[in-house]
C-alpha cells in the first residue's frame, strides 16, 4: 500500500510525517513512512525513526506486570499497598480504600490524574514518588482515590504511575531496565526504550514533535518521566511485534511470554466505556477492547505526537501508525481505515473523524474576563483557532475545538468550555457552571 498516506493528507492536518507497520496472518506484512522528521527539514521519516508512543506505554507496562503475576511474584487482586514500599496510596479522609492491580490495569481504581503535559527541554524532572505526591518539580496534582474502586471506568495515567512504582519496588529494578528484560528483548523490540529524557545519541533518529499548526515544539519534544504512562520511544514495527506477542499468548503458543489464562484475562472486558477515537467499548487489562475482545488496541497523545495501535485477537491482523504532529489523530484514522478496507478487517468502523474547526468570529466574541464564582475569575484569549484560558496564578491552559461550540482542555485536564451566544459554560467533572462575563 505505497499510497496509504499522501502529502495531501499530511498537509491537510499540518503533520510533517508518519510511519506505519501492518501485520497479517500473524507476520509483518508491510511497513512504510512518509514525510520528514521536522517541518522545514530534509531528514525523511523511515521505518526506524523513533516516535513517542504516548499512552501506548500503558499496555507495555501492564504486560510486564502480567509476567510477574505469571511467575507468582504478584497477584491481580491483592491490595497494591501490600507491594508498595517507597510510597503508599494514601487514605481518603478516615477511609483507606483497597486498590488492586486488576483495577489499575483496567482504569477502574477510582484514581485521579488522567494525563500528563510533559516537561520542556531543560526542565527538572520529578521522581515517580514526587509525581505521585503531586509536589515540585512535578506539574500535576497528587494521585488519590476519589471514586469507590471497582465501580466504574475512569482513565487514570496516575494509576499507571502507581503501577510503575509498584513494579520497581517489587523487583528492586528501574522500570526502564525491567521493561527491556520482560518485554522488549523477548519480543525483539530492539528500537524500544523507556528513556526519559531521550539520550543525546538517539536524537538524530527521533522525530520532532509539532503543534496543531505544524510548528516544531520548542526543544523538539517534551520529556515524560511518567514512564509507564507516557514515556515510551519506539517504532510502529516494534508496536506490532508487541501485538503479535499478545496474539500468540492468547492462542496458547508454547513460546508465549504469558500464560493463555492471563492473556484471556487481558482481552476480557472488565469495564464498559465509550471513546470515539479508540473506536472501542470496553477496557481489558491495559488495552481497549471492541466486539467482546476480538479487537484490541490503544491510542496515544503526547505534546506533538499522536499514534494508534490496533490488532485482532484471532486473525493475526493489526497495525500501528505513529505521527509527529498534534493533527496526527486524523492521519492515523485515515491510515487505519484504508488498511481495514484493503485487508478485510472484520467489524472495523469505516467512518472517518473530521477535525473540529472553530468560528474565528465566535472566538473573538468570547475573548474577555469571566467570573466562575465568587472571587474566582479567568481570562479568555482567542489564539490560533482555539482558546487560551488563564486562571489566577496559573499558566495559560489551552482549549482546542471539539465541534458544535465546544472546546476541551489539553494536556489531560478534564475541563470543557461551551460557547453560548456571547457567554461561556465551564464544565468540569460533570458539573456545569454558567460564567458571568465581566469585560
Image (spheres, rainbow, N blue to C red):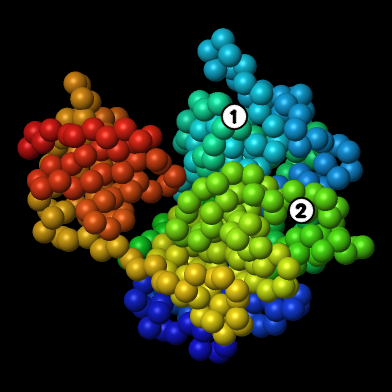
Secondary structure beneath dot 2 equals helix
Q: What residue is shown at x 78% (from left), y 54% (from top)?
A: 263
Compared across the picture, whether 265 is left or right of 279 comes to: right
Which quadrant of the structure image shows residue 384? Answer: bottom left
Which quadrant of the structure image shows residue 245? Answer: bottom right
Q: Could one spot residue 87 in this view of the protein?
A: yes
**Residue placed farthest to the bottom in the image?**
2
Q: Which residue is mark 2?
A: 264
Q: Which residue is mark 1?
A: 149
Crowd rating for badge 2 (residues with CA inside 10 Å; few <14, some 14–19, many 20+): many
Q: Could one spot residue 168 in this view of the protein?
A: no
Considering only order in the chain, which callout, 1 or 2, is on the residue closer to the N terminus? Answer: 1
Mark 2–mark 1 Cα distance, whole angstroms, equals 22 Å
Q: What residue is shown at x 66% (from left), y 52% (from top)?
A: 59
Image disc number at residue 134: none
**Residue placed farthest to the right in the image?**
254
* Near-viewer residue (94 or 312): 312
Secondary structure beneath dot 1 equals loop
Give percent across and percent down for residue 434: 19, 34
Amino acid at each position: 500500500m505505497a499510497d496509504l498516506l499522501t502529502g495531501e493528507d499530511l498537509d491537510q492536518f499540518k503533520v510533517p510525517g508518519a510511519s506505519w507497520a501492518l501485520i497479517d496472518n500473524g507476520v509483518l506484512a508491510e511497513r512504510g513512512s512518509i514525510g520528514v522528521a521536522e517541518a522545514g527539514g530534509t531528514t525523511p521519516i523511515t521505518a526506524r525513526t523513533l516516535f513517542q508512543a504516548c499512552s501506548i506505554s500503558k499496555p507495555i507496562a501492564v504486560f510486564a506486570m502480567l509476567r510477574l503475576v505469571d511467575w507468582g511474584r504478584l497477584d491481580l487482586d491483592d491490595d497494591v499497598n501490600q507491594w508498595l514500599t517507597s510510597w503508599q496510596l494514601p487514605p481518603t479522609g478516615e477511609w483507606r480504600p483497597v486498590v488492586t492491580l486488576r483495577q489499575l490495569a483496567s482504569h477502574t481504581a477510582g484514581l485521579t490524574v488522567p494525563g500528563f503535559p510533559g516537561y520542556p527541554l531543560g526542565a527538572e524532572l520529578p521522581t515517580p514518588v514526587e509525581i505521585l505526591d503531586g509536589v515540585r518539580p512535578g506539574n500535576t496534582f497528587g494521585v488519590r482515590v476519589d471514586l469507590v474502586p471497582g465501580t466504574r471506568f475512569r482513565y487514570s495515567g496516575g494509576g499507571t504511575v502507581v503501577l510503575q512504582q509498584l513494579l520497581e519496588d517489587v523487583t528492586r529494578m528501574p522500570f526502564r531496565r525491567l521493561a527491556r528484560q520482560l518485554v522488549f528483548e523477548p519480543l525483539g523490540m530492539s528500537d524500544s526504550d523507556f528513556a526519559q529524557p531521550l539520550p543525546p545519541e538517539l536524537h538524530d533518529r527521533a522525530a520532532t514533535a509539532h503543534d496543531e499548526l505544524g510548528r516544531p515544539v520548542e526543544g523538539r519534544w517534551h520529556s515524560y518521566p511518567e514512564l509507564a504512562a507516557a514515556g515510551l520511544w519506539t517504532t510502529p514495527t516494534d508496536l506490532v511485534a508487541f501485538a503479535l506477542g499478545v496474539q500468540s499468548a492468547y492462542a496458547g503458543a508454547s513460546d508465549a511470554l504469558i500464560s493463555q489464562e492471563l492473556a484471556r484475562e487481558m482481552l476480557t472486558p472488565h469495564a464498559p466505556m465509550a471513546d470515539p477515537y479508540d473506536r472501542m467499548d470496553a477496557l481489558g487489562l491495559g488495552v481497549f477492547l471492541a466486539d467482546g475482545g476480538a479487537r484490541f488496541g490503544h491510542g496515544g497523545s503526547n505534546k506533538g505526537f499522536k499514534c494508534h495501535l490496533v490488532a485482532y485477537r484471532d486473525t493475526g491482523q493489526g497495525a500501528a501508525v505513529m505521527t509527529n504532529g498534534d493533527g496526527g489523530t486524523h492521519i492515523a484514522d485515515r491510515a487505519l481505515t484504508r488498511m481495514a478496507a484493503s485487508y478485510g478487517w472484520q467489524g472495523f468502523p469505516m467512518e472517518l473523524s473530521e477535525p473540529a474547526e472553530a468560528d474565528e468570529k465566535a472566538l473573538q466574541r468570547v475573548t474577555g474576563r469571566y467570573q466562575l464564582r465568587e472571587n474566582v475569575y479567568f481570562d479568555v484569549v482567542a489564539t490560533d483557532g482555539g482558546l487560551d484560558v488563564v486562571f489566577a496564578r496559573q499558566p495559560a491552559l489551552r482549549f482546542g475545538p471539539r465541534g458544535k461550540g465546544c472546546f476541551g482542555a489539553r494536556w489531560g485536564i478534564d475541563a470543557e468550555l461551551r460557547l453560548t451566544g456571547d457567554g461561556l459554560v465551564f464544565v468540569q467533572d460533570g458539573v456545569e457552571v454558567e460564567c458571568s462575563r465581566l469585560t
